[in-house]
Image (cartoon, rainbow, N blue to C red):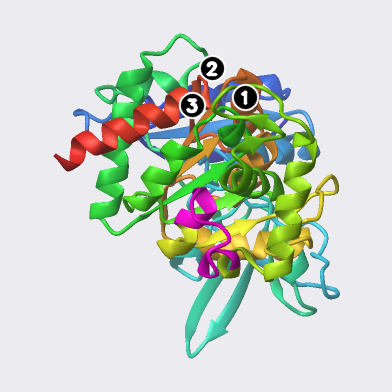
C-alpha cells in the first residue's frame, strides 16, 4: 500500500467538506485513517483533521490526492514545482488545473494567494522586483516560457464557506426543487443586492431571451434604471428581441399586449437587427432616437456596460455582438472583476459560461423554469450557485417590488 497524510482546516464539519473528502477517498478505491482531529469548540472556531490516505498503487494515490485537493485537502508543506510552457497557447504536461475556489501556492516558506481566481486555468508564476505573483491564466493567454505550476504539490485551496443556517438561502444548497418560498428567497436576494452595493461590489445580470418573450423586460428595465444592475451579459437573442419589442411591440412576432401573432411578425426581429446595423451600434440607435425604451436602452442611458456573446445560430447579428467566442470570454473576464452577486435568468449556455469565469466567493443565483439549467450549472463546477425554479416574469416582477420596498 502507498500512503500519504493530508490536512483539512476550516469549518469542515458543518460545511460537510470532511465527509465529502472521506467519501471521495472510498469511492475512488482508497482507504483512510483519521490520525488527528481537533473540533472547533464554538460556531466561529475552525476544525482541523489529519488524514492518512492509502491506496494500492502510486497512480491511484496521486489521483485520490488530486481529487480531494480540489476540496481543500492539503499535503504537507512543500514548495511548488514549475515548468515553462513549451509554446504559445500550450500548457506543459502535468499542469495544475484550477478550480474556482480561493487558492494559494507555497514559495519558500510563504503562501502566496493566486490572483484572478477562475476554474479550468493554469497558475502562472512571475517574479517582479523581488515579489512573487501567481495568477490564473486561461489556455489561449499562455505564452512560450511562462512558468506554470505542475501537479498538486505546494497548492492549497480554501473550501467553500459554510452557509449560514439562519440565512434564507441556506436550504437552497440542497437538491434543486420548485418547492421554495419564492417571495422569501427573492426578498433575501434584494437584500443581498443592497448589501453588495453598499460594500462597493457589483451586481451582474446574465439573461436569456425568455425575459422578453414572457413580458418580463419592463421589470428588468426598471431595475436597471434604478441603478441595481452594474453589468449585463447576454447573447444576440435577448438584445434583438428587446429592440424588436421597443420598435414593434412584439417578440418573435407575437404582440406582447395580446399574446397574438401578427401579420409578417416573423420578420420583425430581422427588421430590428437591420435598423441597428444601419445605425452602427445600439448606443448610436439610442442616441439618434431610434430606440427609445427597453433593456438595451436602459443600459445605454444608465452607462451599464454589456457583453453580447454570439453563437452559430444568430441572425444578423447586431453590430455589438462579439462573434469571436474567445474575445467574448476575455471581455466577460474583465467585467466580472469586482462582481459580488451574479443573477442568471433563463439561459443555460450563458449561465454555464459565466459560472466558469466566477470565483466561488461570488454569490450566484440561477433562475429558470427548468430545473435542468440550475443542475447543469452546479454540475459544471459552480458549486456556490443557489437555484430557484420559477418563471422569469414572476421573478423579475417580484424582485423589482422587493427592491422598491428597500428604497422606502
* Residue 289 lies in the magenta-colored region: yes
Residue 212 visible in the shown view: yes
* Residue bearing the label numbered 2: 176
- Is residue 359 at all visible to an observer of this figure? no
Give the magenta range.
285-298
Dot placed on the residue nearer the N-terminal end, 2 or 3? 2
Query: Marks 1 and 3, how far apart in space?
Result: 21 Å
Q: Does the magenta segment cover residue 68?
A: no
State the image quarter where residue 251 is shown. top right
Residue receiving disc 1: 375
Q: Quadrant of the N terminus?
A: top right
Sequence order check, earlier mark of 2 and 1: 2
**Dot 1 surroundings within 10 Å: few (below 14), some, or many (20 or more)?**
some
Q: Which mark is residue 296?
A: none
Decide which of tag 1 and tag 3 comes sooner along the chain. Answer: 1
Distance of label 2 from label 3 (alpha carbons): 20 Å
8 or 88: nearer the viewer: 88
Which residue shows up at 81% across the image and 55% down it? 316
Amino acid at each position: 500500500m502507498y500512503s500519504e497524510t493530508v490536512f483539512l482546516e476550516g469549518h469542515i464539519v458543518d460545511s460537510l467538506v470532511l465527509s465529502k473528502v472521506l467519501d471521495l477517498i472510498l469511492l475512488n478505491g482508497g482507504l483512510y485513517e483519521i490520525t488527528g482531529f481537533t473540533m472547533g469548540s464554538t460556531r466561529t472556531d475552525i476544525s482541523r483533521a489529519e488524514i492518512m490516505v492509502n491506496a494500492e498503487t502510486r497512480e491511484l494515490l496521486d489521483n485520490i490526492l488530486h481529487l480531494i485537493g480540489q476540496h481543500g485537502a492539503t499535503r504537507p508543506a512543500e514548495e511548488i514545482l514549475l515548468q515553462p510552457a513549451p509554446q504559445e497557447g500550450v500548457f506543459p504536461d502535468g499542469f495544475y488545473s484550477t478550480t474556482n475556489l480561493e487558492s494559494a501556492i507555497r514559495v519558500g516558506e510563504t503562501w502566496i494567494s493566486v490572483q484572478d481566481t477562475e476554474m479550468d486555468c493554469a497558475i502562472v508564476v512571475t517574479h517582479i522586483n523581488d515579489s512573487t505573483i501567481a495568477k490564473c491564466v486561461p489556455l489561449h493567454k499562455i505564452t512560450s516560457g511562462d512558468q506554470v505550476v505542475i501537479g498538486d504539490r505546494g497548492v492549497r485551496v480554501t473550501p467553500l464557506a459554510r452557509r449560514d443556517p439562519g440565512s434564507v438561502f441556506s436550504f437552497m444548497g440542497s437538491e434543486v426543487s420548485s418547492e421554495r418560498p419564492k417571495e422569501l428567497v427573492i426578498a433575501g436576494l434584494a437584500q443581498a443586492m443592497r448589501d453588495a452595493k453598499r460594500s462597493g461590489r457589483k451586481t451582474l445580470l446574465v439573461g436569456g431571451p425568455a425575459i422578453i418573450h414572457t413580458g418580463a423586460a419592463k421589470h428588468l428595465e426598471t431595475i436597471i434604471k434604478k441603478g441595481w444592475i452594474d453589468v449585463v451579459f447576454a447573447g444576440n437573442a435577448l438584445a434583438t428581441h428587446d429592440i424588436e419589442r421597443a420598435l414593434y411591440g412584439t417578440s418573435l412576432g407575437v404582440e406582447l399586449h395580446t399574446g397574438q401573432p401578427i401579420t409578417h411578425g416573423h420578420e420583425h426581429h430581422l427588421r430590428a437587427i437591420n435598423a441597428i446595423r444601419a445605425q452602427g451600434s445600439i448606443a448610436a440607435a439610442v442616441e439618434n432616437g431610434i430606440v427609445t425604451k427597453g433593456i438595451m436602452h436602459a443600459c445605454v442611458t444608465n452607462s451599464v456596460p454589456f457583453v453580447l456573446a454570439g453563437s452559430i445560430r444568430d441572425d444578423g447579428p447586431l453590430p455589438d455582438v462579439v462573434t469571436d467566442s474567445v474575445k467574448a470570454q476575455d471581455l466577460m473576464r474583465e467585467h466580472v472583476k469586482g462582481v459580488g452577486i451574479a443573477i442568471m435568468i433563463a439561459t443555460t449556455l450563458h449561465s454555464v459560461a459565466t459560472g466558469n469565469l466566477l470565483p466561488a466567493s461570488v454569490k450566484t443565483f440561477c433562475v429558470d423554469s427548468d430545473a435542468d439549467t440550475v443542475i447543469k450549472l452546479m454540475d459544471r463546477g459552480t458549486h456556490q450557485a443557489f437555484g430557484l425554479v420559477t418563471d422569469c416574469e414572476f421573478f423579475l416582477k417580484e424582485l423589482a417590488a422587493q427592491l422598491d420596498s428597500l428604497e422606502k
